[in-house]
Amino acid sequence: MGTDIFMRIAFFDCFSGASGDMILAACIDAGLDVDRLREQIALLDLEGFRIDARKVRKQGFAATQVQVVLEPNTPKPHRHLKHIVELIDRSRLPESVRRRARDVFARLAQAEAAVHGTTIEKVHFHEVGAIDAIVDIVGACLALDLLGIERVFVSAIPPGSGSVRCDHGVMPVPAPATAELLKGVPLASCDEPGELITPTGAAILTTLSAGFGPMPAMTLERVGIGAGQREGQTRPNILRLVVGQAVEAVESGETDEILVLQANLDDVTGQVLGHVCEKLLEAGALDVFTTPIYMKKNRPATEISVLAPRAARGAMEDILFAETTTFGIRSHPVHRSKLNRSIETVKTEVGEIRIKVGRRGDRVVRVSPEFEDCRHAARQSGRSLLEVMELARRAWQQQADASTDT
C-alpha cells in the first residue's frame, strides 16, 4: 500500500534570470514578513546597513524590490572565505540557516578559485564579499527557512548576452565565475542584453536546488514576484517564485535526498584515510567508504566517497580539502529510499539486547541485533558472538509472535 508524503517545495522560475536580491524579494512577495526577516538578519551581527523593500511595477507586472542600503562611511573590506564563515558562525542564526549560507559561500569560493587558478583559502571575495551580497545570501537562506521550504527546484536559467563590467574589467556573459557555477545546469537561450544571472544568484540556486527543469507537480499555495534593479529590453527583470505542496507517492518507506561527495587520492596513507573518515563521520556524514582505483599512469590510488545531508556540503568539503591532498571534489545529489526504523529491546538468557527493526509499510523486512550489545553479552557470558546474535533474533521473533497472538 502506498503512502502520500506532503512536502512544501519552492520553484524558482528564472525566465529573466536571477540575482541575490531578486531571490530575497520573491520570498517577501510570496508572504514572508519583511519585519521578521529584518529581526532575524540582525542576528548576523553585521552593522552599517538596512533592508528596504517596496512595491514596484516592471513592464506592467507588480513585484517586490529589495535593496540593501549601506549607511554613510560603512567600511567595505575585501574578505576571504574564512572571514565570512567566522561571521556566520558567530551569529545567533539557526544552525540550518548557517549551514546553507556556509555552503553557498564555499561554492562561490570554489568557483572563484577555479577561475583564478588559486585555492579557496586565498580567494578574495570582491563583489560577493560586500555587505549587500552577504545579506542577500544569508537572507535568502533565512527566508526559505522562515517560509518552511523543504526542497527547492529551479527552471532552466537564461544567462543573458553581451558583456558585463566587474572588478576585473569587461567580461563576456556569463562572467567566468558565473559560468563555473552553472556547470551541469540547463541553460535557456536568451537574446536579452546584459547579465541576467549574477554570481550570487547562481551560487544560491545551484547550492540549494534539488533539481533543474520544468515546474514539479504541486498544489499551488502562493506566488511571489521579485524585481531586479535593471530594466529589461525584451522581458521584465523579474523572478517568479511558486510555493506549494508536493505530493510524492512512496511505497510505504521513507525517502530523502542526500549528497554524494567523492575525491581521488593517490598520495595519502592508510593512517591519514582512517583519520579523515573519523572526522567526516563526527561532522555529520551519514557514511564514508573508500574504493581502490587506478589513476593516470596506472598509479594505484583510493577514491573516498562521502554520503551526507545536502546542508552538510560545506562541512564535508572543508574537511576533505584540509585533511587530504585533493585539489577537487565531485558531488551530486541522489535519491535515497529507506526502511522505517525502530529500536526494540528484548530479554535473553545473556541479558537485554537492543534490536534495530526495519519495516516497509506493515511488513518487517530486517531484524538486526545491535552489534555492541551482542559483543558485550558474548564477552560477559563466554558464548560466541554469532550465538548471542541468534539468541537475540529468536527472542525478538518470540516477542513479535506473542504480540500478534494477543
Image (cartoon, helix red, strand yellow):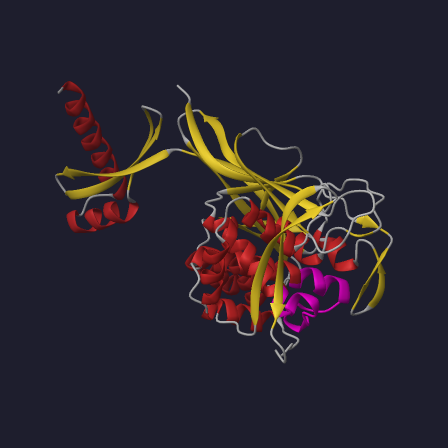
Q: The N terminus is located in which quarter?
A: top left
Chief SS of the magenta region: helix
Q: Nearer the viewer, residue 117 or 278?
A: 117
What x and y, as percent, mark residue 17? 72, 47
Q: At 67% across and 73% down in the image, what residue appears?
A: 122
Is 184 rendered above or below residue 325? above
Does the magenta portion include 111? Answer: yes
Percent coordinates x, y for residue 392 in the rendering: 22, 36
Report the front residue among 6 and 326.
6
Q: Is residue 301 visible?
A: no
396, above or below 301, in the image: above
Quarter of the image for residue 198 reads bottom right
Give the image location of residue 140, x and y in percent.
Answer: 56, 54
Q: Is residue 140 left or right of residue 357?
A: right
Residue at the image point whose x is 51% and y is 52% from the top: 143
Q: Is residue 394 above or below residue 52?
A: above
Locate the C terminus and report the quarter of the image it occupies.
top left
- Seen from the viewer's position, the closer of residues 162 and 203 is 162
Q: Is residue 238 left or right of residue 210?
A: right
Highlighted magenta segment, given as a residue range:
109-132
Name the foreground residue: 314 vs 406.
314
Q: Is residue 2 left or right of residue 272?
A: left
Q: For residue 160, say whether it is visible.
A: yes
Please tell me how many numbered marks the rendered image carries: 0
- Residue name at image x 22 percent, y 50 percent: 376
How far from the left and from the top, in percent, is residue 205?
63, 49
Q: Is residue 164 above or below residue 361?
A: below
